[in-house]
């Protein structure tokens, strides 16, 4: 029976036996995670189901019954509206606007199932990218396709923490697949739709614009055809909300948050904030004369407290949104110029990755989950050369570990460690065997050894942060006082803050679940994770940017 069913599925979908095995395996793992930890994003999306089902469209972006207000673009609101109808049949309380914090098993099972089902859009896109074309563009390696579908980042963020990134990246990869096949208008339309699902993808819009302008818009008629398609897509999204556009925009772009989170996303500003803390510590101990460094009293706690508002540094100059914008645009310009000169498919994918990476590295109030905008498209070109593969290894290792603090409960710790380790072994080992080339110069050997040392340091980092996280419990036991509930450093404080009434503000479609971190020692595991991962991601970014701009083979 099972064999016949598998044969029927393969016949209808064109999947190979191996591809079907991966689908079954991944689905089984995700089903087992139904009872796992859920972040406040679970309640966010339940509330959005209730908003879109219970209220007229004109009220969607005004409702404040819950602090988790609707702050994604209209296409995602329509998406929630479609999901709300089956939800109503499963359990009417799921779409009850006043059923705040409703988490019955029916709601959990339904919402987690929607994540699994909608992620099939990603699976279908990967199958498309794996198929050969008549052109010289090589298909995506099956190993890399499997690595994307089984990515630890998606497992952590979507199937435990709870979001719909698999579906959204599926739309993105369908757009890239259409560009690969030369169907530029359809690719542009899908990307326009993606922007209306989640506006964080604006980070990579410049790469799309340059590539389409260079490869497709060679005549006025072609340009007008593409422009008409994009305008119609945006019209379908925004016209129903025409009388409420200002309110919609105020939800999408609140701009009321500081530069960094309580848990600093591992980017340039995490290193900036860490350097500020180190300089402050040295100044307080008299190791730096006051005449050299002045201390801003407003910055003594600002960069580690995780509160709404501007981040103020104690020693280093403060960073404003305009500064992050300028640095990001300047950085992206080098990659866009390279794409303009070499508008191939591989060059386009590299530019998409690097534009997203520049925004992650230098953007304002970047969420740690945004690293997926780098890791997933980068996987498409990871097997192009050993240099690209090594960059992929460093970025993937540091990027996945940077997501670990999202899962702070003890039950999920073995899951994230074991799953990520198995994924890395299954992805890196076969590609390493095929692509490895021994470094031939002293500089190359030195860099290779330093990179290896950094990678070895990642599991050491996990051991250190776990020991630091357990220290409050050990200390409490030694003093015979009631044990604290600490498992991962600052996260007990974070968990308590999440169960309180959090602020309603958000940025780039991400809800605000930031806590106030009260104890400097409790913040240390997060600081170490952020800074160490920022070093690896920063090096990988410079490495890939250098190879992309200088290489003639892309």
Image (spheres, rainbow, N blue to C red):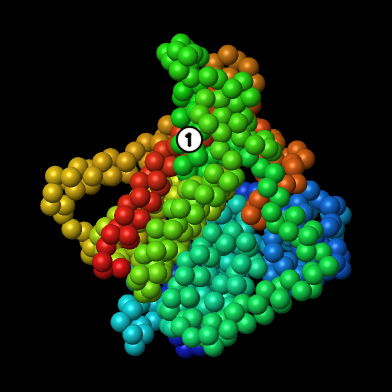
Q: Quadrant of residue 491?
A: top right
| Quadrant location of the C terminus in the rendered image | bottom left
Q: Taking 526 as reference, is 66 above or below it?
A: below
Image location (x, y in percent) of residue 52: 80, 66
Instruction: Name, please, the residue furthest toward the top.
Output: 286
Question: Can residue 515 be seen at all in this image of the molecule?
Answer: no
Describe the element under mark 1 as helix, strand or loop: helix
**What count of labels does the image hold?**
1
Is 37 displayed left or right of 349 in the figure? right
Q: Quadrant of residue 138?
A: bottom left
Q: Which residue is mark 1?
A: 272
Is 551 displayed left or right of 40 in the figure? left
Front-most of residues 234 and 169: 234
Q: Taking 221 as reference, is 27 above or below it?
A: above
- Residue drawn at x 57%, y 76% is 190
- Residue drawn at x 85%, y 60% is 96
Image location (x, y in percent) of residue 168: 58, 67
Question: Can residue 181 be seen at all in this image of the molecule?
Answer: yes
Front-most of residues 7 and 53: 53
């Amino acid at each position: 029976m099972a064999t016949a069913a598998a044969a029927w599925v393969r016949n209808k979908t064109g999947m190979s036996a191996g591809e079907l095995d991966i689908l079954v395996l991944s689905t089984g793992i995700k089903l087992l995670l139904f009872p796992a930890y859920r972040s406040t994003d679970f309640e966010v999306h339940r509330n959005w189901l209730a908003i879109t089902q219970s209220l007229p469209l004109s009220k969607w972006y005004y409702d404040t019954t819950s602090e988790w207000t609707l702050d994604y673009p209209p296409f995602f609101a329509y998406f929630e509206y479609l999901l709300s109808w089956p939800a109503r049949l499963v359990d009417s309380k799921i779409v009850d606007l006043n059923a705040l914090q409703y988490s019955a098993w029916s709601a959990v099972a339904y919402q987690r199932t929607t994540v699994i089902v909608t992620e099939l859009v990603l699976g279908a896109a990967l199958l498309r990218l794996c198929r050969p074309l008549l052109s010289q563009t090589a298909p995506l390696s099956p190993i890399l396709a499997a690595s994307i579908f089984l990515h630890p980042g998606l497992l952590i963020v979507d199937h435990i923490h709870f979001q719909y990134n698999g579906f959204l990246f599926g739309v993105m990869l369908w757009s890239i697949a259409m560009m690969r096949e030369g169907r530029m208008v359809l690719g542009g339309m899908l990307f326009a739709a993606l922007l209306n699902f989640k506006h964080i993808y604006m980070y990579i819009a410049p790469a799309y614009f340059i590539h389409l302008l260079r490869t497709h818009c060679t005549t006025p008629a072609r340009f007008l055809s593409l422009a008409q398609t994009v305008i119609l897509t945006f019209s379908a999204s925004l016209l129903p909300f025409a009388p409420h556009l200002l309110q919609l925009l105020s939800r999408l772009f609140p701009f009321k948050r500081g530069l960094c989170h309580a848990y600093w996303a591992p980017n340039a500003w995490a290193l900036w904030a860490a350097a500020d803390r180190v300089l402050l510590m040295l100044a307080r101990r008299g190791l730096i004369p006051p005449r050299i460094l002045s201390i801003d009293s407003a910055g003594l706690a600002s960069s580690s407290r995780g509160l709404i508002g501007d981040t103020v540094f104690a020693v280093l100059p403060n960073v404003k949104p305009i500064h992050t914008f300028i640095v990001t645009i300047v950085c992206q310009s080098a990659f866009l110029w390279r794409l303009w000169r070499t508008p191939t498919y591989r060059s386009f994918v590299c530019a998409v990755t690097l534009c997203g990476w520049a925004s992650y590295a230098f953007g304002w109030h970047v969420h740690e989950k945004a690293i997926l905008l780098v890791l997933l498209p980068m996987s498409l070109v990871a097997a192009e050369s050993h240099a690209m593969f090594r960059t992929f290894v460093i970025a993937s290792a540091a990027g996945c570990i940077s997501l670990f603090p999202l899962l702070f409960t003890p039950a999920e710790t073995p899951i994230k460690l074991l799953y990520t380790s198995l994924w890395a072994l299954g992805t890196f080992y076969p590609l390493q065997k095929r692509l490895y080339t021994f470094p031939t110069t002293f500089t190359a050997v030195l860099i290779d050894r330093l990179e290896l040392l950094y990678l070895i340091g990642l599991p050491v980092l996990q051991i250190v942060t776990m020991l630091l996280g357990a220290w409050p419990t050990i200390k409490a036991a030694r003093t015979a006082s009631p044990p604290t509930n600490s498992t991962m450093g600052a996260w007990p404080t974070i968990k308590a803050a999440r169960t309180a009434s959090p602020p309603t503000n958000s940025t780039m479609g991400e809800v605000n679940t930031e806590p106030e971190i009260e104890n400097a020692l409790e913040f240390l595991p997060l600081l170490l994770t952020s800074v160490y991962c920022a070093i690896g991601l920063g090096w990988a970014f410079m490495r890939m940017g250098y190879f992309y701009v200088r290489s003639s083979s892309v």
